[in-house]
Image (spheres, rainbow, N blue to C red):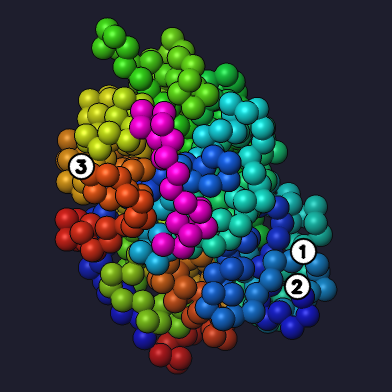
């Protein structure tokens, strides 16, 4: 465990082996952990997650991880990447649950149908490969070209209260949703980079080099 | 700097094309009409090939677990999932909430429930409540009766129920299934193309994504099922593991052909 620069938070919400192995595949040291001491010394954090919002929040509390994570993310400003449910947990709240979120990003998680015309027939969950679109230069998107595709599987979506936090959007049905956000050292993606072949590998590689600067443009 | 340009939003992504791998005695087999299992090879090697080819997703089904009344082989699933850099769904012998949780934790995105969904629809609801609908796939094996009606079968197709697959699909979507995989037993392994009317009636009946399965023999069959039905994805077995009239084993994925047919 020692010397692991990326801690993948293990809070019983799925999906850890593939993330750790994807990092390994691209030559980056990462380990799944729920040890507060290891989390406190990690240089980067990944908050993964497959499952329901309340159970995710409950598990973070139960394992006593909420405090150490808040300390590292908000005070030490360690770069963190939330994946899927992890992205949603960092928002203020979710339509899916009753518990408050971590509230590290000024955004809400809503059901995908929110804001969608009642007349529109939309198959949900949104499952499958999709493109992302961004008008905001950011180190996390380095090397991702126009054909980069990512794998999505979700029924809820994040709505940022501050437009400037939106990093990428994706179209599903008649409207676009926020498929990635970034605010300072805090970033989240709705898709699964660990399951998105070379495109996901590129994004995780970018994350492993990202300093978590407030404005990434200087890195370009 | 990133080159993900504005204007990318209106592009429609290609529908998913999914290899289905059948596990028995911890190795891969392929059936015809759910019988006559032919040995295909080692699952880890197959997954490695699909990784290299950039497959959209894979579905791994242990076709013996339910009939042998045993648990999924978690160790093997974990080994395969850990090497799988594309989304993976696992089915076979999933009967308890703990099974679902364990499998998802191994790095599998979706758990496939078949027999247990018929026997206990509440299990689907509970699995979806705890893990989210997007993690729960209900697969429906349908067989045509002599009178041309479709009936749901369980236990790897060996037991016929009185359930109509369309009504059952609707019920499963209401119960919390995030995706329905509709598999035509009559077309399985025949390479004759999808059962379009079965696929269409199921996909019309629900508002969750529907994956068509059974009968694909060519890339053209994928195109047909997407053109003729509202299926969100097309799955196949033999197409990805056999080659030529004598069904020589050759595991592959038509990455370039799909790009030509559907665009990147």
- Mark 2–mark 1 Cα distance, whole angstroms, equals 7 Å
Residue A79 pos. (x, y %): 61, 78
Label 3 neighbour load within 10 Å: few <14, some 14-19, many 20+: some
Q: Is residue B202 visible?
A: no
Write down the chain letter for disc 1.
A
Instruction: Specify which label sits upstream in the sequence, 2 or 1.
Output: 1
Nearer to us of marks 2 and 3 is 3
Please state, as top left, top right, bottom left or bottom right, where the C terminus of chain B lies in the image. Answer: bottom left
> Chain ID for label 2?
A
Which disc number belongs to residue B221? 3
Residue marked by disc 2: A39
Point 40% across, 90% down: residue? A220
Q: Are the numbered discs 1 and 3 placed on the same chain, yes or no?
A: no
**Residue found at x 65% / y 75%:** A30
Can see residue A72? yes
Left or right of residue A158: residue A29: right
Is A11 a magenta residue? no
Dot 1 falls on a residue whose secondary structure is loop
Instruction: Please tell me which residue lies in front, A40 or B52.
Output: B52
x and y, in percent, of residue A88 in the image? 56, 56
Is mark 2 in CB contact (under 8 Å) with mark 1?
yes
Q: Picture coordinates of residue B118 (x, y %)?
A: 52, 20
Closest to the observer: A201 or B239? B239
- Which residue position holds label 1? A34
Q: Callout 3: residue from which chain?
A: B
Kindly report the distance in space between the C-alpha atoms of the residues bearing marks 2 and 3.
Answer: 50 Å
> Where does the magenta region start and end?
B30-49
Query: Could you tell me how far apart the alpha carbons at marks 1 and 3 are, in whole angstroms?
Result: 47 Å
């Amino acid at each position: 465990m020692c010397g692991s620069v990326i801690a993948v938070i293990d809070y019983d919400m799925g999906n850890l082996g593939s993330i750790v192995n994807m990092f390994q595949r691209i030559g980056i040291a990462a380990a799944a952990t729920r040890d507060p001491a290891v989390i406190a010394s990690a240089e980067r954090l990944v908050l993964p997650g497959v499952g329901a919002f309340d159970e995710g929040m409950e598990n973070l509390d139960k394992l006593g991880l909420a405090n150490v994570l808040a300390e590292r993310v908000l005070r030490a400003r360690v770069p963190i990447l939330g994946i899927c449910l992890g992205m949603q947990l960092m928002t203020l709240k979710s339509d899916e649950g009753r518990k408050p979120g971590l509230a590290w990003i000024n955004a809400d998680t809503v059901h995908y149908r929110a804001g969608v015309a009642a007349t529109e027939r939309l198959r949900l969950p949104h499952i499958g490969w999709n493109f992302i679109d961004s008008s905001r230069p950011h180190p996390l998107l380095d090397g991702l070209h126009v054909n980069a595709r990512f794998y999505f599987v979700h029924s809820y979506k994040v709505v940022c209260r501050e437009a400037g936090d939106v990093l990428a959007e994706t179209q599903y049905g008649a409207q676009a949703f926020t498929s990635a956000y970034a605010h300072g050292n805090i970033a989240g993606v709705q898709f699964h980079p660990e399951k998105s072949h070379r495109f996901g590998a590129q994004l995780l590689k970018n994350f492993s080099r990202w300093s978590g600067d407030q404005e990434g443009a200087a890195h370009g | 700097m990133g080159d993900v340009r504005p204007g990318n939003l209106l592009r429609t992504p290609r529908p998913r094309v999914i290899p289905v791998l059948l596990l028995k005695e911890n190795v891969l087999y392929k059936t015809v009409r759910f019988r006559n299992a032919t040995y295909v090879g080692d699952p880890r090697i197959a997954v490695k090939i699909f990784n290299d080819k950039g497959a959209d997703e894979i579905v791994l089904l242990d076709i013996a677990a339910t009939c042998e009344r045993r648990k999924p082989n978690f160790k093997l699933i974990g080994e395969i999932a850990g090497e799988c850099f594309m989304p993976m769904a696992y089915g076979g012998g999933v009967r308890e909430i703990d099974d679902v949780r364990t499998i998802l934790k191994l790095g599998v995105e979706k758990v496939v429930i078949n027999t247990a969904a018929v026997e206990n629809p509440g299990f689907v609801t509970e699995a979806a409540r705890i893990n989210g609908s997007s993690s729960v796939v209900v697969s429906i094996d349908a067989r045509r009766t002599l009178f041309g009606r479709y009936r749901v079968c369980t236990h790897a197709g060996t037991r016929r129920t009185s359930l109509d697959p369309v009504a059952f699909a609707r019920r499963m979507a209401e119960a919390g299934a995030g995706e329905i995989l509709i598999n035509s037993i009559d077309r399985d392994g025949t390479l004759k193309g999808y059962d379009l009317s079965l696929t269409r009636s199921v996909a019309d009946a629900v508002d969750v994504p529907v994956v068509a399965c059974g009968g694909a023999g060519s890339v053209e069959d994928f195109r047909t099922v997407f053109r003729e039905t509202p299926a969100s994805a097309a799955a196949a077995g033999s197409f990805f593991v056999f080659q030529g009239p004598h069904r020589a084993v050759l595991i592959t994925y038509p990455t370039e052909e799909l790009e030509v047919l559907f665009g990147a």
